[in-house]
Image (cartoon, helix red, strand yellow):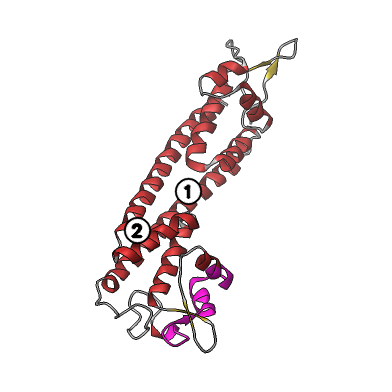
Amino acid sequence: MRQNLQSTERLRPVDLARGHGLSTQAVRNYEAAGILPPAARTPHGYRTYTSLHMGALRAFLALVSGHGHRTATSIMRAVNQGAVERAFHLIDESHAQLLDDRRTLQAVESALRDLEPTSAAAPGTGSGTGSGTGSGTGFGPAAKSGPGGMFIGTLAEKLGIRPATLRTWERAGLVRPRRDPLTGYRVYGEDDVRDARLAHQLRRGGYLLEQIAPLLAQLRAAGGLEPLEAALRDWRGRLNTRGRAMLTGAAELEAYLRET
């Protein structure tokens, strides 16, 4: 890619830094990382920048908000190396990830809708007994592999995770399986399966274990879905903010591409 570094305006590192609340060292680091095009040098070796560098910095900072630091760095490096198609590929991958996150959110919301009849059921009709039709678990009666529930291997297989992950979730308080009195094996009742499903979906949505545990604890204590619904509203808001940030980043990147 031809880089038009000719400009009557010469900017110092501090000029770029000041307008964005950065340090001059950060500007130099961005240049070294390939986020900014190489700076010209004065006869005394001082860096000089132009409006092109200012545009690159604006594009990068806008891309960070929507794509994250690592991807934004890779996008700008590809552009500055003339690999624009590679930059577009990275942007497409990031948009695909956002779409996948939206689908995950929709899956969680669907799971919550499936759970509503279970939450409204009479006491004792669904908690760990396995006597019903499997409503709310999403797996049905055929998936149950032990008296009143599933063993750990069956549940892990249904969720597409490892048994070790379920044990980690148990230590974090996300699931609370009972132990079979004869074998000592973990047995996951209907409520445990529900909690595991929701934990799995929330983990896919970027929630940490320490964020999920209190949500599930509130769900158990309240006997309702309100705590998770509030979390889902927050999740949706973050996805929408990310989507808008991607639009801003695309506009700034397009402006930069027009300058190069």
Label 2 crowd (10 A; few <14 / some 14-19 / many >=20): many
- Check if residue 145 falls in the magenta segment: yes
Tell me: 181 left or right of 140: right
- Check if residue 184 falls in the magenta segment: no
Tell me, yes or no, if residue 127 can be seen here. Answer: yes
Residue 249 lies, in percent from the top left, at: 47, 35
For the point 62% across and 18% down, the residue is 13
- What residue is pinned by disc 2? 228
Tell me: 140 left or right of 173: left
> Is 85 or 31 nearer to us in this picture?
31
Look at the image and tell me in which quarter the C terminus lies.
top right
Look at the image and tell me in which quarter the N terminus lies.
top right
- What residue is pinned by disc 1? 95
For the point 43% across and 38% down, the residue is 245
Element under label 1? helix
Which of the 4 quarters of the picture holds residue 9? top right
Tell me, yes or no, if residue 110 can be seen here. Answer: no
Element under label 2? helix
Query: Cα distance, mark 2 to mark 1?
Result: 26 Å
